[in-house]
Image (tube, grey):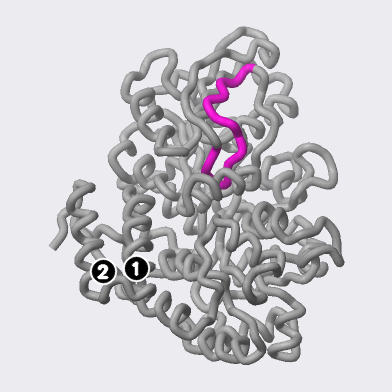
Amino acid sequence: MRKMKRVAAVALSACMVASMVTGCGKSDSGSTEAADDSATTEAADASGSDSSSDDSASGGDGEVINVWSFTDEVPNMIDKFKETHPDFKYDINTTIIATTEGAYQPALDQALAAGGADAPDMYCAEAAFVLKYTQGDMSSYACPYDDLGIDTQNEIDEAKIAQYTVDIGTNPDGKVVGLGYQATGGAFIYRRSIAKDAFGTDDPAEIADIIGAGTQNWDKFWDAAETLKGKGYGIVSGDGDIWHAVENSSDQGWIVDGKLNIDPKREEFLDISKKLKDNDYHNDTQDWQDAWFADMSGTGDKQIFGFFGPAWLINYTLGDNCGGTKVGEGTYGDWAVCAPPVGFFWGGTWVLANKDSEKKEAVGQIIDWITLNCTEDGLQYMWANGTMNGDGGTKDVVASETVMNMSDGTLDFLGGQNMFEVFGEANSYANGKNLTQYDETINQYWRDQVRQYSNGEKDRDTAIADFKQQVADNLAVEVE
């Protein structure tokens, strides 16, 4: 998603979808655009599709590789691959279907199951539903990277790929079938001016200590919230700002041995949400809505100290809603990042290949260039340094630590801070073993019930019971 046009769509569609931002750009003239590419990590603005081949990009013999995605981010990367590999002898036929209203997955599933010449050779999945394709119901279609001619484990080691992304992309047989190009380990993104006023410093190392970085609990965070309250500030905009840190730092996922499981850390979100509300530690906003965006520019009910999120939240959400485009305008330049109390990730896109594709070697060349190439000629180096479309593009955190160590992650938006130093470490703390294929749906049920509880509309037991009932009524999951 270049994550950002996505942000707009995410705001319009659903808070969960917003999880995964990727880079959007101009679609290839030969692609099937089933959706407007204005979505965030995950959302685009429409649905429906048809197919056409890109004759203008022909490599020579007219053979076609079918690519399916939910935004034009990966298709644009493939355009760049073809541009930099003029001897690549394949046309690219792209189908783009937005995740809006759940349109992408059913269409992709049908295309994979139908097989034949029109089946996807290569396809994308985002964090909200990727496990369905790497480890769940549709994982049997995913081709191990080893079978694509990729020296998978050696290249993972050389590139120092964030382990959580590898875990998520590994099938039940222990084979890597999907990897990403960006890494979405989370940090705490805070306002420097508020830090100086409330704590006397804006130094990331000191702020990290003040909020309890690495403690794996929220005790010092609450102390910081009380200090900020005394100065008239909120520590976060809404409870959703903490949810992703809670969700992806849990020890277990929503389903264990086929049964609904409420991990104690996720259950604690009931208490976190209520504490934020009862103590007036936030503006009680909901993510991806106008009041949330207002807090990024400092125009909300009260000034907000920070947000939990990955680098894409900076580049494509905070950056777009800070009220300015250069230092001194709005909150632009008044931000910094530090380690969070708990390790987590939020969002991401994984790239997979169809085991039945007859073009495995060619697909493998593309996937390897996107996900594992750690040279200056690979996609990740261009992505990290903002050079895919020439100098001056958006810098982003990538899956390869090797690439980030070769790259410059300083941003004016962060007061000249090198974000790679913080996010590189954040990626190492993220846990990729607590996801399920039903997360997108179950998360929505849970967050709705938590909000009703913190608003005083239900007691704790009723909220939990209603949550369990929703899961039992709507998903093929055993509930006790």
- Rendered-image quadrant of the C terminus: bottom left
Vertical position of residue 28 compared to residue 164: above or below: above
Image quadrant where residue 318 sits: bottom right
Query: Which residue sits at x=56%, y=73%?
Result: 283
- Rendered-image quadrant of the N terminus: top right
Mark 1 vs mark 2, CA separation in Å: 7 Å
The residue singled out by tag 2 in the image is 463
Vertical position of residue 73 compared to residue 297: above or below: above
Q: Give how far across and how far down residue 462 sits, in percent.
A: 21, 70
SS category of the residue bearing label 2: helix
Q: Give how far across and how far down residue 149 sits, in percent.
A: 51, 32
Q: Is residue 306 left or right of residue 102?
A: right
Q: Is residue 311 left or right of residue 48?
A: right
- Depth check: give the residue in front, 310 or 181: 310
Query: Which residue sits at x=79%, y=46%?
Result: 393
> Is residue 155 among what the camera can see?
no
Disc nearer the start of the sequence (1/2): 1
The residue singled out by tag 1 in the image is 452
Q: Give how far across and how far down residue 9 sits, in percent.
A: 57, 43
Label 1 vs label 2, nearer the camera: 1
Mark 2 belongs to which amino acid? Ala
